[in-house]
Image (cartoon, grey):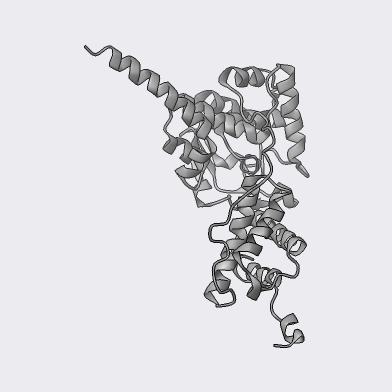
């Protein structure tokens, strides 16, 4: 083979770009698609001249190592998984001789110290007491609603008065508000996210008065362009006012789920209420809470056994 022939061999970054275009574009949500495009950009930066025919375990490990220098281990793992699908297809097509991802070692920078993601029951009570709940919809009302339902921010923005069933004390979640891309109703994150959320009687009474004269099919909280940072700022102000850890609006969702788990609600019920795709998602997200509960259960079991004679 001549030098010119070698230069015509397909590059992995070109193959990957085509693979994403054929198999992912239009089949996944835009937020996930952005992650694939980011992976493409890193691939061109780290291995711009890597040819498919030259792929080996060594240069794949070097690629992963290069990415790991700039990212935490979990992010590096995600990068690896996004590449692996395309690589296995290339192996099936005979473009790569053997699977170079086999036995890869995932490295990464030390994780940053995580901010507090949720409040305990007493902290939440103090923060909610600081809200100013007027006669019309406001961000304070949205904060209360998310704290009591565990909705995602985009789901809460997509709510209309028509979504509330005051007789049966339920809230229907079947759409979201696309605040990141200029607004408008869009489908929920996944099929499991379409759900009915039970509401407590106190919230029902408050909301029935709040929504009484509002247009039935228009979003309750949206008036022009919405920024996640605006609501996070308002929530941070309330947290600081009462001296509790500052959390994000998504942290309110974590708070809601954690309080339910500590109260003894089953993982299956919490998963359904949050609209998770599976119970595994709930278990992975709230592992710290589940472990605390397991320790508590061990104490209860030991106390029960110690009474047996």
Q: Where is 263 relative to 106, above or below?
A: above
Question: Is 294 left or right of 109, judged from the image as shown?
Answer: left
Residue 249, picture quadrant? top right
Residue 109 falls left or right of residue 99: right
* Of 61 and 75, the residue lying toward us: 61
Q: Given the current orientation, which residue lies at the most extreme bottom position? A: 2
Q: Nearer the viewer, residue 106 or 200?
A: 106
* Quadrant in the picture for residue 120: top right
Q: Where 182 falls versus 13 (above or below)?
A: above
Residue closest to the eye, 39 or 201: 39
Rendering coords of residue 15 (x, y %): 66, 72
Residue 177 % position (x, y) = 66, 47
User: Residue 94 in the image: x percent, y percent?
Assistant: 55, 78
**At 67% from the left edge and 39% from the top edge, which residue is drawn?**
110
The C terminus lies in quadrant: top left
Inspect this view and state whether residue 238 appears. yes
Position of 107 with respect to 199 (left or right) is right
- Quarter assignment of residue 245: top right
- Residue found at x 64% / y 55%: 79
User: Is residue 194 among what the camera can see?
Assistant: no
């Amino acid at each position: 083979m001549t030098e010119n022939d070698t230069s015509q061999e397909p590059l992995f970054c070109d193959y990957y770009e085509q693979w994403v275009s054929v198999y992912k574009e239009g089949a996944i949500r835009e937020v996930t698609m952005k992650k694939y495009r980011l992976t493409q950009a890193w691939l061109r930066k780290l291995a711009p001249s890597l040819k498919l025919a030259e792929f080996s375990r060594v240069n794949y490990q070097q690629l992963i190592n290069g990415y790991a220098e700039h990212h935490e281990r979990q992010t590096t793992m995600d990068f690896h998984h996004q590449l692996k699908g395309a690589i296995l297809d290339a192996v099936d097509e005979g473009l790569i001789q053997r699977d170079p991802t086999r036995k890869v070692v995932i490295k990464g920078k030390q994780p940053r110290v995580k901010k507090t993601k949720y409040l305990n029951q007493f902290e939440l009570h103090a923060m909610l007491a600081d809200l100013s709940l007027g006669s019309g919809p406001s961000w304070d009302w949205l904060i209360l609603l998310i704290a009591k339902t565990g909705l995602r921010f985009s789901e809460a923005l997509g709510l209309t008065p028509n979504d509330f069933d005051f007789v049966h004390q339920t809230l229907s979640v079947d759409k979201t508000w696309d605040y990141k891309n200029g607004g408008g109703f869009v489908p929920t994150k996944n099929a499991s996210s379409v759900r009915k959320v039970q509401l407590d009687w106190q919230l029902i009474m408050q909301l029935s008065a709040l929504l009484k004269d509002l247009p039935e099919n228009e979003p309750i909280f949206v008036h022009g362009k919405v920024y996640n940072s605006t609501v996070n700022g308002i929530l941070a102000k309330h947290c600081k006012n009462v001296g509790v850890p500052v959390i994000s609006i998504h942290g309110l969702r974590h708070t809601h789920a954690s309080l339910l788990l500590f109260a003894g609600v089953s993982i299956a019920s919490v998963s359904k209420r949050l609209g998770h795709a599976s119970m595994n998602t709930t278990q992975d997200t709230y592992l710290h809470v589940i472990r605390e509960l397991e320790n508590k259960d061990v104490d209860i079991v030991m106390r029960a056994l110690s009474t047996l004679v």
